Image (cartoon, rainbow, N blue to C red):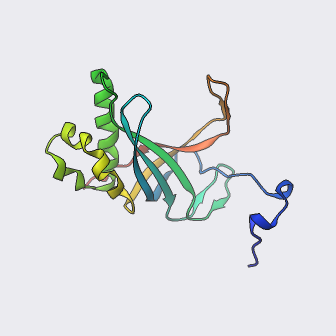
Amino acid sequence: MNTVSLLDQDLGAIDVSSPLIRHNDIVNFVIKEAVYKPTQKGGGMISLQLATTEPTISQEGETLPAGKVVFDNVNCKPAPGAKPAAQEMCAKNTASIVQATKFAGCKQYGTTAAQQLAAAEQWASQLTGLPVRAKVIIEPAGVSPSGKAFKAKNAIGLYVIPKS
């Protein structure tokens, strides 16, 4: 098959559509990149880039090839002064990705969630390359409170934790 590079095309002729994975499908991914990032309020998150490992079905019913990318941010460190509910949310969100990937590398940083979360900056990148199953959702297009428009996109609804 002879493919033409996007850079060889006129900008007015490039197909800018981006088919979305069907809403609520359970999909197999590999974590292409996992990076710890500080948040604006002083907390921390693990920014994930996931790629499908097998063909999936789009919301229009067409087959999408393996490699479709979905992004996710997992809050892992509450901002200073965060309420207990925010601290628990960070622990549960991080526990879901750790358990879904069967990642044990955070255990070397302590035996409690508080110790392991505090060290997330040291171990987050070790999630790169791990397989994970997740429920994919579609976030609808809209306008943010600041007036920025955004188009519909796939997001992770939840990570599937293996039973064994």
- In the rendered image, the residue lying farthest to the left is 111
Asked whether, in this view, residue 100 is left or right of residue 70, the answer is left
Query: Could you say where residue 64 lies in the image, as x and y percent from the top left?
Result: 63, 61
In the rendered view, tell whether residue 87 sits above or below residue 36.
above
Specify whether residue 96 is in view. yes
Query: Could you say where residue 2 lies in the image, as x and y percent from the top left?
Result: 76, 78
Residue positioned 67% across, 39% down in the render: 151
Asked whether, in this view, residue 148 is left or right of residue 45, the answer is right
Question: Could you say which quadrant of the image residue 15 lies in?
Answer: bottom right
Residue positioned 36% across, 33% down in the render: 43
Specify whether residue 104 is in view. no
Quarter of the figure that contains the N terminus: bottom right
Of residue 39 and residue 159, the one placed in the foreground of this image is 39
Residue positioned 55% across, 63% down in the render: 67
Query: Could you say where residue 14 lies in the image, as x and y percent from the top left?
Result: 80, 57
Question: Could you say which quadrant of the image residue 79 lies in?
Answer: top left
Asked whether, in this view, residue 29 is left or right of residue 112, the answer is right
Query: Could you say where residue 124 lies in the image, as x and y percent from the top left?
Result: 33, 51
In the rendered view, tell whether residue 158 sits above or below residue 63.
above
Asked whether, in this view, residue 53 is left or right of residue 5, the answer is left
In the rendered view, tell whether residue 161 sits above or below residue 146.
below
In the rendered view, tell whether residue 30 sits above or below residue 156.
below
Count of number-bearing discs: 0
Quarter of the figure that contains the C terminus: bottom left
